[in-house]
Image: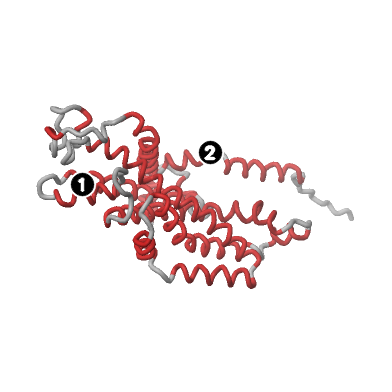
Amino acid sequence: MSTQIDLVPVKPTTAIVGEADTETARRRDPGVWLRMLGNDRVAAAAATVLALVFLVAIFGPMLVGDLATDIDLDNSNQAPFTLAHGWANILGTDPLGRSMLARLIVASRTTLSVAVPAVVISAVIGSMIGMWAGFHRGWRETVAMRVADVIMSFPSLLLAVVVLYVFSPSAANIILVLAITRIPVYLRTARAESAELQSRVFVDAARTFGAGASSIIMRHVVPIVLPTLLTVATLDFCYVMLAESSLSFLGIGIQPPDISWGLMVSQGRTYLHTAWWLSFFPGLAIVITTVSATILAAWARIATDPGQRWRLTVPQKRLSRFAGAAKRLS
């Protein structure tokens, strides 16, 4: 009696590896992220606004020239939305007759030149220390966490006020103090992620093949932790920008003749009843920028989560149609 055995064809190992490499390359393709961003219209609008703000901050001051500093007392406190005095005064003028539009453009560079370096410095230092401490554990983790607890025991804005009151207020001092106070945010996040990853199977396999701790952190831990840290950095950018605006509003931040959005709000508060636009437009710029960054951070959190990413692969119209059909069926 003969027994017939059905043989199931199995894909070669090279084919499986090739498919895995193709999937990895697809996820790293910038076009995939752009398509997911395009499927979320709100996030796409927020990204467009942020890109416009950064472009204005980079190239705007070169285009407006001296319009932000030209004094014209005959046109002081001109109301906005009138073209009688030229396009530069479309948003009105300040008490010295200077263009509000030009000053907003110049102030955007100052505000971002403080917020971006502070976030980058705190993110790099805090993330590296956190991943190093979480991967090695032991006394390294204990020391790093106790230092973070000491820094976080002081309110960051209050610490910045004290430091800037003792030392001279300047952009460099503001960047330094805000960067130091925000380091624990990245340190604690990176430490938690790295401590969880250091016991994974792929990390044990890398150790078995003789990879050092630094190599494992850079090649295996950083790519996994990076999306979370970028999301935290996007949210922290909002906090740092608001903190700089608050310090400038209190008079211990950016000092004249430099100008920032927070300083413009502070300078216009005495004219709120007679020239509301002096504080309104810089405050509106702060709100629009921070809200756009918050929306983009929420999108990035979903885009980097494998369990939620599918929501961004379907256009919103089709997704709402599926939700309506599911509701009717239920």
User: Do callouts 1 and 2 mark residues in contact (Cβ within 8 Å)?
Assistant: no
Mark 2 highlights which residue? 30
Secondary structure under the numbered disc 1 in the rendered image: helix
Label number found at residue 280: 1
Q: Is residue 301 visible?
A: no
Number of numbered discs visible in the structure rendering: 2
Secondary structure under the numbered disc 2 in the rendered image: helix
Q: Residues within 10 Å of mark 1 (few under 14, many from 20)?
A: some
Circle nearer the N terminus (1, 2): 2
Query: In what quadrant of the picture does the C terminus appear?
Result: bottom left
Q: How is the image coloured?
A: secondary structure
Measuring from the top left, give residue 147's x and y in whole percent: 52, 69
> Is 328 on the left or on the right of 300, as rendered?
left
| Position above or below: 80 against 131 | above
Measuring from the top left, give residue 176's x and y in whole percent: 45, 55
The three-letter amino acid code for the residue at tag 2 is Pro
Mark 1 or mark 2: which is in front?
1
> Is 328 on the left or on the right of 9, as rendered?
left
| Position above or below: 174 against 281 | below
Residue at 39%, 42% in the rendered image: 47
Which residue is more in the foreground, 24 or 191?
191
The three-letter amino acid code for the residue at tag 1 is Phe
Residue at 64%, 72% in the rendered image: 138
| Position above or below: 9 against 60 | below
- The picture quadrant where one finds residue 213 is bottom right
Residue at 16%, 37% in the rendered image: 80
Residue at 46%, 67% in the rendered image: 151
